[in-house]
Image: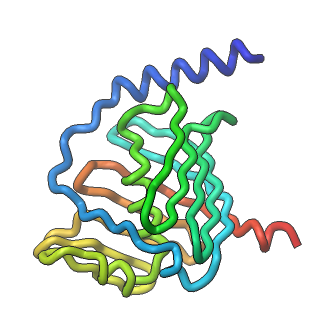
Amino acid sequence: MQRLILILMLGLLASCASTRMPAPKVQLPALRLAPSALPEPLQLQQRLQFRFGSHERELDALLEADHDQVRLAVQAMGQTGVRMTWDGTTLEQTRAPWLPPQVRGERVLDDLQFALWPADAIRAALPPGWHLVDHGDTRRLEQGDTAWLMLDTDPDGRMRLRNLAEGYELMIESLDMEQAHP
């Protein structure tokens, strides 16, 4: 069984390594929002489907956020790829050696905050020339008239994040861990 896991992990690493992400079309602003900007604590188990071009990966994530800190662990095939903590000032991350360099904790944090933090907190963090369009179930981060980061939320709560600057898409299905365990 360990040999099979090793073979699968090496296959995943090889396919990720062959998927070179081109330079972004535009540099998205870093949000780096305070955990305290969340109106309520979060405890979510997530299924993530990452798509870059014709390459797709399925990952699992555990997310906990409260007034003081955001904690995230992302796993692939039962192995932790990245573990992050964000206290509003410092981003600490532990990465597995097999994790492709394209998976950056800073970008993961920004995507997470774009999807889950209140619109007013995002707007307050944006530099001049950038603006957030928020219609409840859709969000767009725009520079001028061009949308570079978009989020659509389905009625069932699934989210689709499209990063047009870096050319990837992320489908997010979340389960509230507090509701799952009465």
Describe residue 122's horizontal placement relative to residue 142 as left or right. right
Considering every residue shown, the one lying at the far front of the view is 89
177 up-or-down from 80: above or below: below
54 up-or-down from 73: above or below: above
Q: Position of residue 171 (x, y in %)?
A: 49, 56
Residue name at image x 51 percent, y 73 percent: 35
Residue name at image x 58 percent, y 72 percent: 68
Describe residue 137's horizontal placement relative to residue 162 as left or right. right
21 up-or-down from 88: above or below: above
| Colour treatment of the image | rainbow
Residue name at image x 27 percent, y 37 percent: 21
Compare residues 122 and 150 and report the one nearer the observer: 122
Q: Position of residue 116 (x, y in %)?
A: 49, 73
Describe residue 118's horizontal placement relative to residue 130 as left or right. right
Residue name at image x 50 percent, y 46 percent: 93
Q: Quadrant of residue 147?
A: bottom left
Marks counted in the figure total 0
Considering every residue shown, the one lying at the far top of the view is 3
Compare residues 173 and 115 and report the one nearer the observer: 115
52 up-or-down from 116: above or below: above
Considering every residue shown, the one lying at the far right of the view is 182
Q: Quadrant of residue 90?
A: bottom left
Query: Which quadrant is home to the N terminus?
Result: top right
Q: Position of residue 59 (x, y in %)?
A: 58, 44
Q: Quadrant of residue 138?
A: bottom left
Q: Position of residue 152 (x, y in %)?
A: 42, 71
Compare residues 53 and 166 and report the one nearer the observer: 166
Query: Which quadrant is home to the C terminus?
Result: bottom right
